[in-house]
Amino acid sequence: MPEPIDLLTTAYGDLSTTLASLTVEEGWQPTGCAGWTPVDLGFHLLGDARRALVALNTPAPGPVDRTAVDYWSAWRPPAPGDDEELWSTRIAASVHGGLIGIARRYAETSAAVLVAAGRVDAGDLVATQGHVLTVADLCSTLVVEAAVHHLDLVAHLTRPGPAPGPLAEVRRVLEGLLGRPLPQGWDDGTAARRGTGREPLTTADRAELGGAAADFPLFG
């Protein structure tokens, strides 16, 4: 299995390339997040990279209270009609130079995250969002966030999606949350979309999952 820092290097590099490739017009197209544009999503991703940079420079005494899997147990999809985060994100994004400015800042910040991650040990403890994780588990959460939002970003655009490694990490985390394997007929992209509620379960999915279908989406 690839190391989390290697997966993060891939996930951040690919996402940075994709953001930089988008035109101004494409910045206002739909994404896999209902109501969100690439501009909105790009600013959200920039915020996540900034949080990562802070976390990697915030050592914690412990004990660990979250792993790469149960970190996601508190993250649920927003309720229908809950547009507060979208509007605050869009307002903030508007003062950051639009898509071009956001893409440039994301490239700079995500590169700095990778440098910071390379300067600490995988077993070191760091703090983020009121929790304590190992660096390895923090990197996993960042990979999952980047890969899922990369899928969102290109949902309606002709751009490549996330690489196999980061998508496999998303599946590993989803299966950890579910406590059992996801349907074998799902490729990792399908697993990411259905596991996070971006794509509905089919009748066949529900039959195969049985009672576990009630646990979907596993996070969002």
Image (cartoon, rainbow, N blue to C red):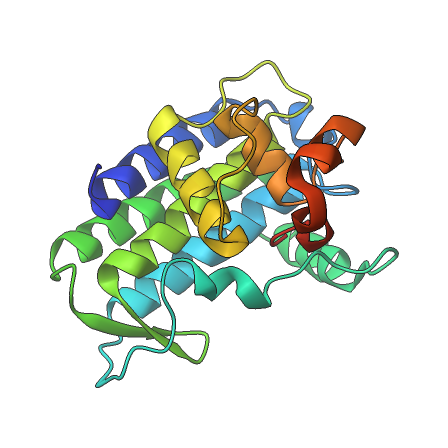
**Viewer-side residue, 1 vs 151:** 1
Foreground of the two, 178 or 116: 178
Residue 63 sits in quarter: bottom left
Can see residue 145?
Answer: no
Asked which quadrant contains residue 201, the reply is top right
**Is 219 left or right of 21, judged from the image as shown?**
right
Q: Where is residue 108 in the image (x, y as percent from the top left)?
A: 33, 45
Q: In this view, does 37 lie above or below 72?
A: above
Query: Which residue corresponds to the image point at 53% horizontal and 27% vertical from the top-left?
Result: 189
x then y, percent, for residue 2:
21, 37
Query: Outermost residue, right direction?
Result: 81
Q: Residue 217: x, y in percent?
A: 67, 50
Is 64 positioned to the left or the right of 152 in the image? left
Q: Is residue 208 above or below residue 58?
A: above
Residue that appears at 36% across and 39% down: 12
- Looking at the picture, how far across and down is residue 149, in whole percent? 55, 40
The residue sitting at 56% across, 49% down in the picture is: 43
One can see residue 151 in this view = yes
214 horizontally vs 132: left or right = right
97 sits to left or right of 167: right
